[in-house]
Image: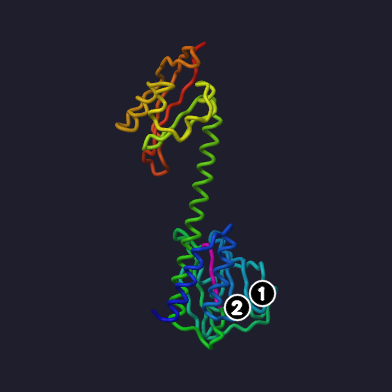
Amino acid sequence: MTEMTKKCYDMVDEFLKKRFLSEDEIWNFYIAEMASFLNCEAATYFEANDEKKVLMIKEVLGPVSREIGNVAFKYEGIAGWCAENKTAIFSSNVMKDPRFSRKMDFASGFRTSSILAYPCLAGGKIIGVAEFINSKSGEFSEEEFMAGRVVTRLVSQYVYILRLEETIKKLSFKGESTINNLSGGFIGVDLEGKIIFFNPKAKEIFEVGDEYSQKSLGDLANLCPEFVERLNEVLKVGKTVRRQEVKCLVGGRAKVIGYSSISIKGVDGKSIGAGVIFQDITNL
């Protein structure tokens, strides 16, 4: 293992050990660690809005960080080209690079001589660009450039996974909230027959508390054996029923329950469980 490979491995290992509370924390850590790893004079992370073709400076390290913080501009220069083409750039002499724009140097008084720029991609979409400017060692190496590509891709995928997890949490919360506010009872089980939904109205109809949450499907036999049969039919052969009635003994009294069974499907359309929707129709 070369010294650079070891340094790269150590940086990634440290990254994976940390627990981040936000995307900003991730990019702040990434920029700082990469700047140290590449031994460069300055570094910037730009957040990309690909729809509007705009880059906004989110994190800056270097001698002119205060002068250029929170600046937004249309895709231009090396960072803009990197975002537009979703391609990493190794520009060893920016004065001979037609993609380079001098506007930032003019505004800040900083002098750029070389740049490593990396597109940060999440699900194939550009979410940002990272730039590392002027090697303190004199010039960047091809090995450093390639190591930076690997680390940037890993961090970008990490952010993408966090975004997916957050989306799933929001969808799950929205779905659970909807189920809890149904006017009728709802009991749902996953593919293994574990009870994952037992909404407030179901508890009210069967006059129980939280004791059935996370229990197995067989435990429902204590409340309504027919529900067990109907849910098993959905899980095993995909058979559902509509507008059926069953009598259940609840608190020593017979209740007439009107119900339908359904298959619970995921976002990909595949079955992830089964459920029964029901009402107490005893007095109707």
Q: Are the residues tagged 2 and 1 within 8 Å (C-beta)?
A: yes
Q: In this orientation, does residue 284 appear? A: no
On the image, the x and y values in percent for residue 119 come to 49, 68
Q: Which residue is at 50% across, 17% downward?
A: 280
Image height of 127 relative to 65, above or below? above
Labelled disc at residue 227: none
Secondary structure under tag 2 reads strand
Determine which quarter of the picture holds residue 47: bottom right
Q: Main secondary structure of the magenta part?
A: strand
The one nearer the camera, 220 or 243, is 220
**Residue pictured at 34% horizontal, 33% vertical:** 235
Q: Which residue is mark 2?
A: 42
Front in this rendered view, residue 48 or 172: 172
Q: Earlier in the sequence, mark 2 or mark 1?
A: 2
In the picture of the structure, the residue carrying the numbered disc 1 is 65
Closer-to-camera residue (234/92): 234
State the residue lying farthest toward the right: 67
Give the Cα distance between marks 2 and 1. Answer: 8 Å
Percent coordinates x, y for residue 113 in the rendering: 56, 85
Q: Is residue 166 magenta?
A: no
Residues in magenta, as a range:
127-132
